[in-house]
Amino acid sequence: MIKLLHHGAASGVTGSCHQLWLDSHHSILVDCGLFQGEDLARRQPPNLEIEFSLAGVEALIVTHCHIDHIGRIPYLLAAGFTGPIFCSKASAQLMPLILEDAVKLGFTRDRRLVDRFLALIQQRLKPLPYHRWHAIPENAPGMVRLRPAGHILGSAVVEIAMDRHRRVAFSGDLGCYDTPLLPDPDPPKRADLLVLEATYGNRNHEHRDKRNRRLRAILESTLADGGTTLIPAFSIGRTQELLYELEELLFQMLGEGALSKVPIVVDSPLAARITRSYRRLQTLWDSEAKERLRRGRHPLDFEQLITIEDHYQHQALVNRLQHSGEPAIVLAASGMCSGGRIVNYLKALAGDPRTDILFVGYQAPGTAGHKLQQLSRPGRVMIDNEPIQVNAQIHSLSGFSAHADQPDLVRFVSGMTLPPTTIRLVHGTPMAQKGLATRLKRAIPGVKVELAALIRHGSRQNAPA
């Protein structure tokens, strides 16, 4: 029997936090992420405090640094967690940047308190190389090993060897195969229980070539009108992939038309810091990206790229775009429009029909991004608690999603040397989980597939696998 509790991301896609018992007295956590949108609203009351006992919790293992997987770490420490935080080496470099931003937004801007928190995080972080087993703290049984997940830089599939016989694997968030910059997901050889994400479990993404053709068409259309293309993008992962593809698009055009001269703006201090980290971690890039470097191209640092750091520059650019009609491509966080600098752009430009708003990632139900994405005609949307008239064109390109779609999820499982005995689907709506479960049962006869969305006891989910 394997005891597993889900303290988030069981029937939604945010708040990832999974507790695995290694024996009757010791457990570990895999991720401790922020709830967003309807996932947060469903909590009664809607807060982020740790509501489960930490007795016997020996370690936290982080799959990657997106905020829906690490955003509750400050609350975890405040609740008394004193164990190590295992993650990949790249995640250990990126995590303090993300958590610093989160603490400033959600807790305090007092520099001394922020620095004390970051020093504590640095003390707890235990970076692990990929593909090597490492012992969980000595008073708990078990070993942990990380494998590349292809989702963002440093993302990892987590393998737990509970003893000589039982093995559990957590996919974390899996990236698509053939994603720019990153190696493909690397499935474990075997697992008695595989905890698998299902964000796009019932969807197929556009092929990379098709999505890039659509991206070019959208940009050319809005720029022909003298408008702005607004791209709400997460600071880590999507921003860097978009820059990579935009550099290729500009290289192909090589002076052809207005698009090759338009400024590409990254307006996010955090995204700028993350992008610099991506550049420093070039050894982790895939072969395609390294080949561009060898040819003298710089996919994350090219001539038309403009980075906005301070708030004065940000506000000046918002005002300029609102009144000048100059074309621009703007990437700004947050990716779900639930805060950050993208909000100011939306307030200023969403009412202009020349504006295009381009979504390239998942929009959780209940977020402003999801409400915008659902618009089929001009209308009003609540943004930052204000009703905003939206006359802009709304577009979605699923091919830029950082999450594997149904074929890639099935490919990941099929890539295991021995199929898992049981697959537990998490990090997806009930509909997405059901769609993926049906496909997995057809692809892997005899496998047992469980839906975490249906395993509920109060506010938690618990069942033997």
Image: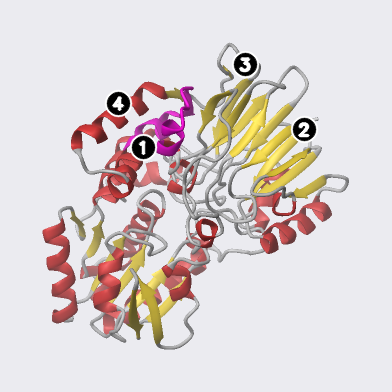
Q: Quadrant of residue 203?
A: bottom right
Between discs 2 and 4, the one toward the N terminus: 4
Q: Inspect the magenta stretch and tell me whether residue 180 lies in it.
A: no
Q: Which mark is residue 192?
A: 2
Kindly identify the amino acid type of the residue bearing the numbered disc 4: Ala
Residue 77: in magenta span: yes
* Dot 1 or dot 4, earlier in sequence: 1
Most distant residue in the top direction: 138
Q: Is residue 74 something that shows in the picture?
A: yes
In terms of secondary structure, where does tag 2 sit? Answer: loop
Label number found at residue 140: 3
Mark carried by residue 119: 4
Between marks 2 and 1, how big is the CA–CA gap?
A: 31 Å
**Mark 3 or mark 1: whose residue is earlier in sequence:** 1
Please name the residue shown 59% across and 19% down the image: 133
| Closer to us: 54 or 368 | 54
- State the count of labels: 4
Q: Earlier in the sequence, mark 3 or mark 4?
A: 4
Residue 113 lies, with reference to residue 219, above or below; the image says: above
Three-letter amino acid code of the residue under disc 1: Leu
- 1 and 4 marks in contact (CB < 8 Å): no
Q: Amino acid at mark 3?
A: Ala
Quadrant where the N terminus is found in the figure: top right
Query: Which residue type does callout 2 highlight?
Result: Asp
Q: Earlier in the sequence, mark 2 or mark 3?
A: 3
Q: CA distance from mark 2 to mark 3?
A: 20 Å
